[in-house]
Image (tube, grey):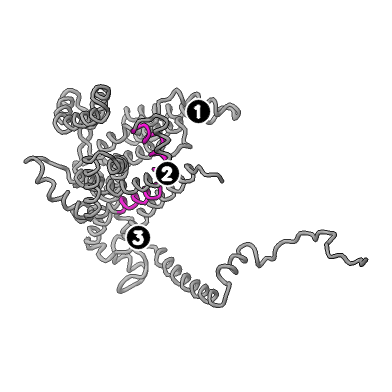
């Protein structure tokens, strides 16, 4: 027998991997310098990136923030012809105009500063969508945010009543959130949950906000948005009354017709009557004063909020067994998708008033909102139809086996899964709609791009291009990138696969 052994009797001690194979060095060797060709391309790319970044940094960091004209900018960075650095004085001089357009700011004699109204509408929008979009925010914190926003607004408006109301709202918000921060850690969750159940559901404010925002932006009598809200209330009670008598579908059709009659024929009279009895309102603002990012956000938010439910209805109607419903939905979707948005905007601007009764004053922004919403809804319908088509047939059969009717099956089983599948497409459509709001400059509305052309028409800023477009692009990127990040967060939150 030989004493030689081919099996190791002792394990070798563990050793750290070579420094050239791990960390940044290992990653660089594997991805950037793993061959002669890749190494040459990497070096050339780094030289090009350094050249571009150094040029952009030298262009962007220029001491021209307080300049009053392009000529002053050129004097500051010493360029006799053309300019080789950014002239940020135009942003310092016109940033409020890029944000608010010509919304009254008290600069003209006899006018008051009303820009607190769009700012308040935007802050309340954040409060309204928080309980809808984020489940980590508790009911208590939603009401704390609402009290804080309204309280600070009252303090900003000033006056004895404003100060008293503002301090009362801030105190109420502090009292609501007190237990959330002072309760014992072991009992905090139970105490917060028990205290939150005594508070109203924050979704109540989310439902009220669509009627508050137009009133804040356009002003006028408060009874007009109240009358618009009453249309939904009347339609709901009509549906509840007729659903058990003539069926759900017929009851819904009658309820919609009754609501339309109220909105078209009776709302204005109701508002005028109530205003004569109890005058409550804000100073009205004309639509021609809207502009800048305030206009883009208004159009984008309304189109996004309204296109999703309309798109769901159109997607379900396209899959309906009712021939008339299916034909109407298919015809609408294919017609809208086959026509450019700019064509629809021209129709809204020039042709829509032809079909209205003589003397009808149909607001131009309202016309644009309708057309952009319908355009987005057609694309949204196809995105949701893709989610519905991706569901296995067994999900529909399971809903039938449970004895659920059509609407309960859609609400509890089908639509939640279809919407989860369609999240990337839905958010992509939202981003596209928000970016398409710049097309309204073609029909004379002063969105950020339209305002940039008006600003460059001023002799002081004639020739400034990249600074304005860069500022506009940055703000659009912030909004669109935020929507994209939220889409990824929502996908992770709703992921139900095993990991």
**Residue 311 within the segment the image draws in magenta:** no
Residue at 40 percent of width and 25 percent of height: 200
Residue numbers of the magenta segment: 406-435
In the image, residue 51 sits, relative to residue 87, either above or below, namely below
Residue 161: image x %, image y %? Answer: 32, 27
Characterize the magenta stretch by its predominant secondary structure.
helix
Residue found at the far right of this picture: 1
What crowding class fits label 1: few (fewer than 14 Cα within 10 Å), some (14-19), or many (20 or more)? some
Q: Give the labeled residue for mark 1.
A: 178
The image position of residue 195, as x and y in percent, is 48, 24
Q: Nearer the viewer, residue 30 or 239?
A: 239
The residue at the point 60 percent across, 28 percent down is 186
Q: CA distance from mark 3 to mark 1?
A: 44 Å
Q: Quadrant of residue 162?
A: top left
Residue beneath disc 3: 470
Q: Is residue 30 visible?
A: yes
Of 443 and 386, the residue lying toward us: 386
N-term mark: 1 or 2: 1
In the figure, is residue 160 to the left or right of 336?
Answer: right
Position of residue 487 relative to residue 281, above or below, is below
Q: Residue 392: which numbered mark, if any?
A: 2
Q: Of the two numbered discs 2 and 3 on the same chain, state the one appearing first in sequence.
A: 2
In the rendered image, is residue 107 in sight?
no
Question: Which label lies toward us, 1 or 2?
Answer: 2
Looking at the image, which residue is at 13% across and 31% down?
A: 265
Find the distance from the CA under tag 1 to the CA under tag 2.
Answer: 48 Å
Q: Is residue 166 left or right of residue 286?
A: right
Callout 2: helix, strand or loop?
A: loop
Local SS, label 1: helix
Mark 2 and mark 1 in contact (Cβ < 8 Å)? no
Query: Splitting the image into 4 quarters, where does residue 270 fall?
Result: top left
């Amino acid at each position: 027998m030989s004493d030689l052994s081919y099996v190791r009797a002792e394990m070798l001690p563990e050793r750290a991997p070579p420094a050239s194979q791990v960390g940044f060095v290992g990653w660089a060797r594997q991805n950037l310098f793993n061959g002669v060709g890749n190494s040459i391309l990497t070096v050339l790319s780094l030289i090009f990136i350094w050249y571009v970044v150094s040029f952009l940094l030298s262009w962007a960091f220029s001491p021209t923030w307080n300049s009053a004209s392009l000529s002053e900018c050129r004097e500051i960075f010493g360029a006799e012809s053309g300019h080789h650095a950014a002239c940020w004085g135009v942003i310092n001089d016109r940033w409020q105009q890029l944000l608010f357009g010509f919304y009254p700011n008290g600069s003209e004699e006899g006018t008051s500063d009303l820009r607190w109204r769009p700012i308040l509408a935007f802050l309340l929008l954040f409060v309204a969508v928080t309980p809808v979009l984020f489940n980590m925010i508790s009911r208590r914190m939603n009401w704390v945010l609402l009290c804080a926003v309204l309280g600070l607004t009252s303090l900003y408006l000033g006056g004895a009543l404003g100060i008293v109301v503002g301090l009362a709202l801030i105190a109420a918000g502090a009292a609501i959130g007190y237990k959330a921060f002072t309760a014992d850690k072991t009992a905090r969750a139970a105490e917060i949950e028990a205290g939150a159940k005594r508070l109203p559901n924050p979704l109540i404010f989310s439902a009220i906000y669509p009627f508050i925002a137009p009133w804040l932006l356009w002003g006028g009598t408060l009874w007009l948005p109240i009358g618009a809200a009453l249309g939904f209330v009347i339609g709901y009670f009509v549906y509840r009354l007729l659903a058990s008598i003539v069926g759900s579908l017929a009851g819904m059709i009658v309820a919609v017709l009754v609501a339309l009659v109220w909105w078209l024929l009776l709302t204005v009279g109701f508002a005028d009557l109530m205003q004569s009895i109890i005058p409550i309102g804000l100073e009205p603002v004309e639509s021609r004063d809207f502009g800048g990012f305030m206009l883009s956000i208004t159009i984008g938010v309304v189109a996004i909020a309204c296109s999703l439910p309309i798109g769901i209805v159109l997607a379900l109607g396209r899959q309906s067994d009712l021939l008339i419903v299916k034909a109407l939905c298919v015809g609408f979707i294919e017609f809208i998708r086959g026509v450019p948005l700019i064509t629809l905007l021209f129709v809204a601007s020039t042709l829509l008033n032809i079909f209205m009764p003589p003397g009808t004053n149909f607001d131009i922004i309202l016309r644009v909102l309708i057309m952009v919403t319908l355009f987005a809804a057609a694309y949204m319908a196809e995105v949701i139809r893709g989610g519905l088509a991706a569901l296995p047939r067994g999900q529909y059969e399971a809903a039938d086996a449970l004895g659920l009717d059509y609407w309960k099956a859609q609400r509890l089983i089908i639509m939640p899964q279809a919407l989860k599948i369609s999240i990337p497409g839905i958010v992509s459509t939202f981003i596209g709609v928000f970016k398409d709001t710049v097309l309204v400059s073609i029909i004379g509305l002063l969105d950020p791009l339209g305002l940039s052309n008006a600003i460059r028409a001023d002799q002081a800023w004639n020739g400034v291009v990249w600074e304005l477009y860069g500022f506009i692009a940055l703000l659009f990127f912030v909004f669109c990138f935020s929507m994209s990040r939220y889409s990824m967060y929502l996908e992770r939150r709703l992921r139900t696969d095993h990991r």
